[in-house]
Image: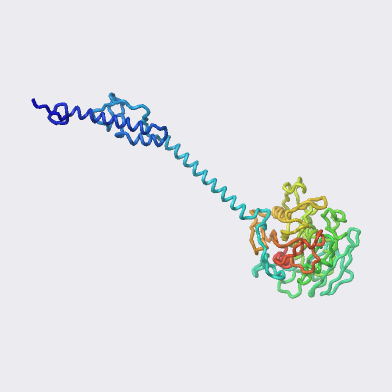
Amino acid sequence: MHVNRNPFDPENPNAQRRARENSARKARHSIADSTQANSEDSWRGRRRRHEARPAVRHRREDHGGSWKGAHPSVSGENRREPEGISRSRPTGQHFRRRRIAAAMFVAFLLACAAGVGAAVQKLSSSRHEDPQAHNTVNEPADYAPTEAVAIPPATPDVQLTPAVARIPQKLRPIHDELKPGQNRELQLKSSDRERKYIINVPRGALPYSKKGNSTAHPDAKTKPLPLIFAFHGYREQADQMARYTGLADKEAIVVYPQGVGNAWEGAPYAKVKRGEDVRFVRDILDAVSSTYQVDANRIYATGMSNGGGFVGKLACELPEEFAAFAAVSAAYYSGTWRACAEKGSDPKRPETVHFKRGQTSPYLDIHGRKDQTIHYDGGPRYGDEYLGAYEFTQQYAARSHCVGAPVTTRVTDAIQRVQWPNCGHGMEVTHLAIGDAGHTWMGERTGEAGKAAADPSRESKSKAVTATGEIAAFFEVHRRS
């Protein structure tokens, strides 16, 4: 009898059954091998186990049928699932977790980038209270420029306020009147003291007249002249201030008052009572305007060192009389800014010092970064604490209703200009940080400025800028309205 040994012979009645069993056996062996090879408990192992499955299977909705996609001979009831194999697919919750993790990772990267950027900016740029810290000085000129470098000149379209002769509060004319083109030292009794001052009267000055003190036409050849007060530094004399500033060359009446004990009110070493020097300024104003026609809209004050600090005091206590102020290497002792400060401002704790809002006039501060006497950032001196130049100017800007962060401009390698915006019509607050300047009147050639320095030879003389030129340009663009 012939026996068919081929189990897959289609004529063999058991061939189809055996083929199904062989297929199911191979499937089981394939799953077992995959389980052994991917037994590690990790997402990579689960991925490989998922890919090693013979087919994607889904139960029917009633969970009672066979696996869809499996071999027809393998039913859901007879098929055993190998241990350790999870047939769950990623759900919506898994995807949400992955998205959250990815978002957190991106946020971490952004935070790292921001931190690196902040560190780079901190290393490569100046702090707000130290605007000149990273400037280099490279000024090849033998002499400082005489014209303004940092203060923009007045533009032709600026609307000028007509000149108006000041009416003195108390008529007290100078007895020995100077002729135009002369300068002389005069005496004046103020607060029961005999005080002195030097006055320079330029050509073109008009005598005071009650009948002729009307408003002058802007194009008139003869009209009231501006008046500039110039206050010397500690241990200096008025005639020294006149020599090293050169303000007499300007078309203005210039007054150089002399401080009692060569000092001014507001400093801890002042020799006068509180209010005496301010009264002295008022008396000079009346004396000069009782003798000459002084433009009430162009009265200015400038000063050096202790005199610069006194200018700050006038800006706090007498702003209504002045069109603008300018201070050079100023010593802002606590007595100079008390009238501006809010209650609770402690000079020994500069961070507590805040100026209250009030009436102000345009202000220019010029200070050298190499000042060894009145340090740029402030400090202790004579038992008192003086504010840094930038700090005082910033507080004055707050008092002047300025809104917004200051705008810093690098004018040259040695000059940085800081201006506070949005201070109102006609109002300006500007600070000039001079990189190569010590305790001096920048650009002066006499060597007489800065006598308060313990060692004047250590104080650098700037060739980058001339303080007189910058101040003259600043005064030119500001008139009281």
Q: Position of residue 143 (x, y in %)?
A: 72, 70
Q: Nearer the viewer, residue 236 or 394?
A: 236
Tell me if residue 59 can be seen.
yes
User: Which residue is painted at 40% across and 37% down in the image?
Assistant: 44
Give the image location of residue 337, x and y in percent.
77, 53
Among the 4 quarters of the image, the one containing residue 409: bottom right
Question: In terms of depth relative to the viewer, which is nearer, 252 or 50?
Answer: 50
Image quadrant where one finds the N terminus: top left
Q: How many marks?
A: 0
Q: Is residue 439 left or right of residue 96?
A: right
> In this rendering, is residue 3 above or below 418?
above
Residue furthest to the top = 77
In this picture, residue 213 sits left or right of residue 421 = right
* Residue 204 x %, y %: 78, 75
User: What residue do we see at 44% from left, 37% from top?
Assistant: 96
151 in relation to 107, above or below? below
Q: Quadrant of residue 224?
A: bottom right
Task: Answer whether residue 146 is visible to the viewer in this image.
Answer: no
With 336 as the anchor, is 118 left or right in this view?
left
Q: Residue drawn 31% across and 28% down?
A: 61
In the foreground, 193 or 259: 259
Indicate the colouring scheme: rainbow
User: Which quarter of the rendering shows the C terminus?
Assistant: bottom right
Residue 422 image position (x, y, % from top left)? 65, 57
